[in-house]
Image (cartoon, rainbow, N blue to C red):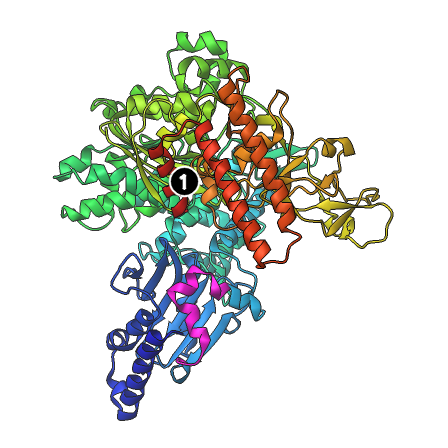
Amino acid sequence: MNDVMQKKIHGLVEKYRAEKESGKLKKYTEEETKKGFIEPLFTALGWDITDKNEVSAEENISSKRVDYGFYLDERVQFYLEAKAAKENIEDSKWADQAVKYSWNKGVTWAVLTNFERLIVFNAQDIERSLADKELFDIAFEDYEKDERLLLLSKDAFAKNELDAYAEKIGKKFKRVPITSQLYEDLNEARELLTDALAGWNDELKKKPDLLDEGVQKLLDRLIFIRVAEDRGVEPETLTPLVRAWDASKNKNEVPLYQWMINKFRELDETYNSNLFQEHPFEKWQEYGGATEKAIELLRGKKGYYEYDFKVMPADVLGTVYEQYLGHRLSKSKKGLALDKDAGKRKEQGIYYTPAFIVDYIVKNALSPILDHCKTIDDLHKIKVLDPACGSGSFLIKALEVLYEKYREFGQPEGETTKLVILTHNLYGVDLDEQAVEIARLNLLINALDERRKLPYLTDHIKCGNSLISGTDTELKKYFGSNFDEKRRFNWEEEFPEVFKQGGFDIVIGNPPYISLSGRQSADIDEDERRYLHEKYESIQGWPTLHSAFVERSIKLLSKRMLSFIVPDQVGHLEGYGHLRKFILDNAGLTKVKYWGEDVFADATTPSITFVADKEYKGATSIYKINDEKVEVLLSGQKTWTAGSSLIDKLREKTESLGDLVADLGVHTGNVSQEIIKPIDAKSKDCVPVLEGKNISRYFCEKPEKCLLINYKVKEGEYFTIRPKDRYKKATFVVRQTASLPIVGPKRFTDYFRNSLLALYPPQDKREIEYLVGILNSKLMRFIYQNTVQESGQKAFPQVKIKSLRELPIRSIDFSKSKEKTTHDEVVKLAREMLELNEKLSSIEENSNQWEQLKAEIEKTDKKIDDEIYKLYGLTAQEISTVEQSLAKS
């Protein structure tokens, strides 16, 4: 605790002590306690209480709300429940309120305080009762000396110290986020209902699709009712219904399932939405108690975790339903079963987008349009589309943002305004019928504030193939008589009111990440490939569905905004040049942001978001992973990278490093402990093996480990060791666990682990030391940092083989004496660096001789940098740009 912080906390403690001794605390209200003690305490801990983006007073959603949410990088770190100083916070109802709220919001930590005491709970530890969720409890007298208080500081959350502390003391209990538990409960309900309905209705065993549809309809209705109950729109409905049925005399003759159907008819009269319309499943029978159990599952487990759909964020249901969509009911020889391989939508390149990305895209796409709206009529005219809407997460966020704008213009608060938005502003399309059904449900749930009739949404959220359209005659040329199976979507016919005003104002989303060629090619028939290639110019080069979605979306725009999240390769790979050119020929890029690999929970796909505006002509703001911002004027196929004009110049007269670098290291599989031993191992089959830590620029230190090359695998074990001559040919290696290429000689052994990449000699007249000099140079570091976006990643940085293979290596025309001389000079200097670093390793560090040799190494290193600058044709100004950029990194 620094002096300033300690002084502030000491002052608060003494003030509280004095007020307590005088008896004045008994008169303090909750608001006075917050303003006088609790807010100043967290201000002392580094939080800006006045900044609503950092500390927000939670919206007054019910009497069960908590008081504050504490944010870092737009993500909630913990919720705080504040009580009056006189309040007894040992009363379990206050802890229960804080924990339940935090868990339903998807946040781990809940804090309860009246300043007298401060208690921290792990809200996601659902396997323990409330009393056991407590992490620590501090009395106000100990605030100055108890270091645990600092775990709630802003700086501590930036460093993840509260998690580390919980793990250290053995209290990092199993965390179960609400998304995981709700999915488990929803899926269990789905399985129970599926088994029960199939068991009681023999005809359904031959109709898995209808059975799956019916079960989804029933669950959709139960969830809608639960939301309506928690929001106070409907009185408590399901539990009284179960109790009344259980108490009835004919419960064994009329199942609860049929009592539910009667309730659905009543709700259909109230809401008039297709959600409660008659469906074949209402005629099915179910006597096994599955319906009752499904209702219980949607309430939670009392005393451990309970669902509160009123406070639950919109993205929670979205995440859960995306997992739900990953399963399909299918027939097998053993009967009906849910396909537990949740890869259906992943195989289709569909990943659920986390809330912070959805927020970023929606706000950046909508804000410029909304800022120009002057009247309610202007708002009514705005048309927002997600062409691959999935469960509706982007449209739900757009609903929230538009709702706030309508409120600014004095539109009434509540459902009426939200229904206006649903029927005037929002549109979605998806190829998956279940996804469309769920998107409609999610939107209705988020608009549900009072008892009134709801829109059908069938005119706004539709099922179809966003990429295929045309007349019968046109489509028969590609798909023959079965063209209807492609679910064409003729946009002007489906949304005529949109195209009367020229098209959509805003297109947002996360299109499917699917390649149409190569090893990762999707299972798409040849007719569809031919159609896409002929209709979409942007997929020339590297053909992908996300490229086609971008092109289609730009064509659907009237004049303004498009914002998507796509693989980061779109921004820099040569194969995406046609897509970049199409975008910049038809719009201006306002923002490009690189997010790295940590976006999707179930995929390590480095990603970027971009915002394109048909009316924008200025420079593009490019944000790297570390949030460094650079303004760049882009055009044509130029890469979307900082310093792109200089990068484009540096690619001239070059060829990619390509296959000269390879991933051939020993893969230890699941037997690392068995086959990697200390170097003093006495086995005759143990040979030295290099690891990443043994390699630095121009140097290789003696390995400390050896490899049991003749290890006999047991059942279930695996590892990969290639033939010795494959390793022998690589005379240099590149360190993989680094933020930039580090190349050193391969010495002492032929074997190396897969933390190193093999570097092979060129097949032409160039010497391998020529490559080593370039790869270890300042200029290559600059190129790498400005083309490989994960280079800005601080946690677990890694040099990837695909990134290395794309690095531009200057070609040499040996018939030109100037080029040959430069090549030879780089080779000579690189060899000198190898010798000098070898000598340095044998001299005692910090001795005079060591200092002299170190200075000579730095001097030689600079000579190589100068030669590389000259080799790539940099001017003095460009060299200065490179040096200044590197100085900041």
Residue situated in front as seen by the camera: 834 or 853:
853
Above or below, 300 relative to 493: below
Q: Locate residue 708 relative to residue 39 in the image: left or right.
A: right
Counting from the top left corner in percent of width and height, residue 113 is at: 37, 75
Magenta part of the chain: 143-163
Q: Which amino acid does label 1 sit on?
A: Tyr
- Check the image and name the residue furthest to the right: 684
How busy is the neighbourhood of tag 1: few (under 14 within 10 Å), some, or many (20 plus)? many
- Check the image and name the residue furthest to the bottom: 22
Residue 464 in view of the camera: no
Above or below, 881 relative to 92: above
Residue holding disc 1: 594
Counting from the top left corner in percent of width and height, residue 526 is at: 54, 15
The residue shown at (40%, 7%) is 473
Above or below, 634 relative to 60: above
Helix, strand or loop for disc 1: strand
The residue shown at (27%, 76%) is 30
Residue situated in front as seen by the camera: 370 or 191:
370
Q: Locate residue 471 relative to residue 497 in the image: left or right.
A: right
Residue 107 in view of the camera: yes
